[in-house]
Amino acid sequence: MSIFHRSNILFRNPSFSGTLAGCSAHALWGVAVLYWHLLATLPAVTILAHRMLWSLLLLLGLLAATRRLPELSAALRSRREAPRLALCAALLSVNWGFFLWGVTTGRVVEASLGYFITPLLNVLMGRFLLGERLSRAQTLAILLALAGVSWKIVVYGHVPWLALTVAASFALYGFFQKTLRVGAAPGLTAELVFLAPFALVWLAWAHPHDFGGLAGHGLSQPLLLMGTALFTAIPLQLFGYAAQRVTLATLGILQYVSPSLNFLFAVTLLGERLESSDMVAFPLIWCALAVYTRDALQTLARMRREAATLRAQKRA
């Protein structure tokens, strides 16, 4: 069998192609920290406003090309979905805004810590908001994560509010996303429709003489601002493709790719200094994630065995 034929079979495997798409999405989100750093001379709110507007234009084009604009219109007119989408839009703006602020002010390490904490917050929200029971491994993971954050507070002398804000906003965003009955692309576009007026007002007020930072800065800055859409729409489309083809456990493991890259770039390329509290807090968080991931994989394997047993019993 030729290498080309083997590769073709491999890429046709939904699990492999989905995992590749998920890795690509999180790799793009991880590399994006270097992209945002190129725009560090601009206020974080200005970068955020451009990201919203250019992403909206790109997604509107994608929806038009795939003839899905009616889905967007229906979502915006829905009495049930529109308020939920507006709430998701507010949480998304908080998450994006504070993360961008962290990157442009040299606090990438703390911002990336927030995304490490997010999955564990999801477990806690499931326990207290949805009544889900925690396994012993999940309880241990939560305690390890709390120990890491607590150590950072004690040694560093203040609450890592940036990390906690990033984590809480993204965890709540994911929670309320589960209540939506709208496709990923139309849903995100609707959220950006809600945010677009605020973005336009900010650019008009903060940058009245240079068309929102586009004029008078050469060609590089406008192109970089337009390119912010690529680090929004493309990863989200890849992530949506992956979500339909791989298990939730795999998606959970892939979620750690982007903050790991953020952390790596921060200490190697962006010149951020690790605090003494980070040397303890991050290993504790990583241990918590390892415990959490192992438990998720074991749960998934058990569910697969139970499903296979039920199928065998039905055939008997």
Image (cartoon, rainbow, N blue to C red):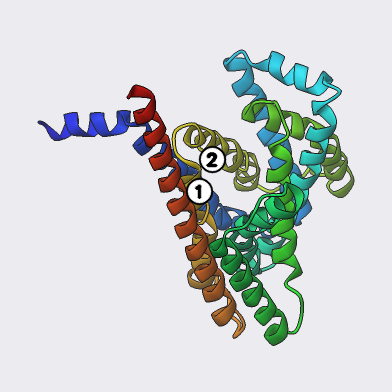
- Residue 109 as seen in the image, left or right of residue 210: left
**Quarter that holds the N terminus:** top left
Q: Quadrant of residue 84?
A: top right
Above or below: residue 309 compared with residue 216: above
Q: Amino acid at mark 2?
A: Pro
Image location (x, y in percent) of residue 310: 41, 32
Label 1 sits on a secondary structure element that is helix
Residue at figure coordinates x 47%, y 36% from the top left: 242
From this view, report whether residue 280 is shown above or below residue 86: below
Residue drawn at (50%, 36%), measured in percent from left and top?
238
**152 sits left or right of 246 in the view:** right
Q: How dense is the environment of label 2, judged by Cα within 10 Å: few (below 14), some, or many (20 and up)?
A: many
Dot 1 amino acid type:
His
Precedes in sequence: disc 2 or disc 1: 1
The label number, if any, that marks residue 26 in the structure image? 1
Q: Are marks 2 and 1 in contact (CB under 8 Å)?
A: yes
Q: 56 or 245, which is in the foreground?
A: 245
Q: The C terminus lies in which quarter of the figure?
A: top left
Q: Quadrant of residue 113?
A: bottom right
Residue 158 sits in quarter: bottom right
Q: Using the image, tell me which numbered label, if any, was put on residue 235.
A: 2
Residue at 62%, 54% in the rendered image: 36
Residue at 76% of width from left, 75% of height from top?
Answer: 159
Q: Give the CA separation, mark 2 to mark 1.
A: 7 Å
